[in-house]
Amino acid sequence: MRARAALALALLLASCAGGSVAPAPSPAPATPPAHPGGSLFSTIPCAGTPLGLAWARLLPEVSARFPGLKLTEVADLHVTVVYVGPGWRAEELARIRALALVAPAEAVAIHPELVRFGANGHVVVAELRGAPASWLAAVTAAKAEMNRLGLKKPDRYDAEFRPHVTLASARHRPPEASEAAALDALRAWVAAQAEPKPDAWVVSLGPESPVRLWLANLARPAGEPEYVDLDLVTRPR
């Protein structure tokens, strides 16, 4: 018995001395998220707001009255917060999210003002005047930091944030004379419809506002929304 135990111990010691423990395999490098293309921007969707519901009621008549303009579909209504652009990098998404998803820190209900907008006056928007000053400053600061880090390219709108919801746009920039007249007429007509019930057009903003990352300029089937939620096209299958 003692001889057998001694033999077993000798074999164990020999195994420990002569063998080596295999190193644990290194974890595989994380796979970067897919890059579906398109222009990236952070946004507050507005389809479900009173403004969105009011626009949905008017859209059939607006389409009949102003066939020469490009009208925003209800699903595409939004407030652009930070425009990142087409040069975004999939491996930088975590840093982009951390900076671009800026919600207002205080709650406010805004009755928008319908105005011509854009460098060429090529759009009619519901401008959200009276948005919290702290939010405007936070968005401007986020853009400056993203520019510093190279997460977006600087653009003309970085220094001033004027939140708005685009309702209609001309098909040319600058608008042709007929389009400019149609934009003015649309603005006046929609404003007249909104005037009797201003609360029906309100947009509420605050800490709970659903700030999302959307993509523009993707190939879309006819009838589909123009913009796509980034998470819908990069979610693991």
Image: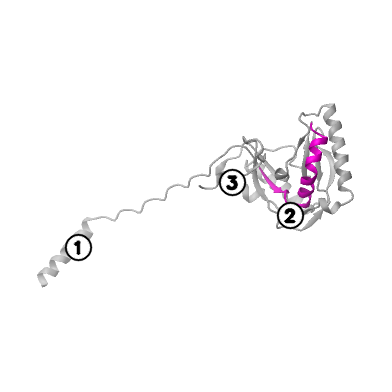
> In this rendering, does residue 163 appear at all?
no
In front of the other: 75 or 83: 75
Quadrant (top left/top right/bottom left/bottom right) for the N terminus: bottom left
SS at badge 3 = helix
Looking at the image, do the residues carrying marks 1 and 3 touch, with CB atoms under 8 Å apart? no
Give the residue displayed 78% in from the left and 52% down from the top.
50
Q: CA distance from mark 1 to mark 3?
A: 58 Å
The amino acid type of the residue labelled 1 equals Leu
Task: Tell us which disc is closer to us: 1 or 3.
Answer: 3
- Residue 104 badge: 2
Give SS at disc 1.
helix
Q: Is residue 60 left or right of residue 221?
A: right
Image location of residue 199, percent across then percent down = 84, 54
Where on the picture, by quarter, is residue 165?
Answer: top right
Please indicate whether residue 28 sits to the left or right of residue 55 in the image.
left
Query: Which mark is drawn over residue 232?
Result: 3
**Residue 65 forms part of the magenta stretch:** yes
Sequence-wise first label, 2 or 1: 1
Residue tagged 1:
13
Q: Name the residue at 13% across, 68% down.
A: 6
**Crowd rating for badge 1 (residues with CA inside 10 Å; few <14, some 14–19, many 20+):** few
Of badges 3 and 2, nearer the viewer stands: 3
Image side of residue 64 versus residue 36, left or right: right
